[in-house]
Amino acid sequence: MALSEKFSYTELGLLSIQDLVELNKRAVSTIKSKRLLAGLDNATKLTIDATVKINSPKFIGDDFKVFKINKAKAVLTHVKTNVNYTVPFSMIVT
C-alpha cells in the first residue's frame, strides 16, 4: 500500500511539526522492528557450510559459504576468493 493512499501531502502539511516528529518516530520504530524480524527469520534458516548469497551490489550473483553464526551477524566465506566477510542476517539471502 502506497503512502499516498494513507496521507496526502496536503494532509501531512496540515500536521504540526511535533505531530510529524511523532509520526516519524513511529515509522522508524516499525521499520526497525520489521527488519529485525526478517533478520531473525534468516538466522534460523542458516546452517554452517550452507551456500548463500548476499544482498549487496558489490557481490551480485556471488556465492558464499556460512563459516560461523554469531548473535546478530554471520561470517561468510566468498567461494571464489576464500575471503571472510561479517554480514548482518538481514543482508543474507538463503
Image (cartoon, rainbow, N blue to C red):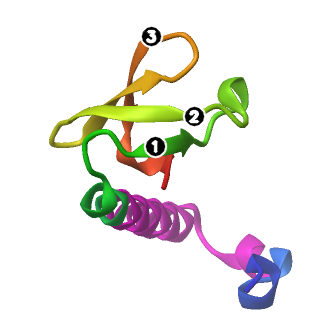
| Circle 1: element type | strand
Q: Which residue is mark 3?
A: 83
N-terminal of the two: label 1 or label 2? 1
Residue type pointed to by label 1: Thr
Which stretch is magenta?
A: 11-39
Residue drawn at the location 56% of the way across and 42% of the way down? 53
Residue type pointed to by label 3: Val
Circles 1 and 2, Cβ within 8 Å, touching? The answer is yes
Q: Which residue is mark 1?
A: 51
Whole-Å distance between the Cαs marked 1 and 2?
6 Å
**Camera-side residue: 37 or 11?**
37
Up/down of 82 relative to 94, above or below: above
**Camera-side residue: 77 or 21?**
77
Residue drawn at the location 71% of the way across and 88% of the way down? 6
| Circle 3: element type | loop
Give the x, y percent position of residue 23.
50, 70
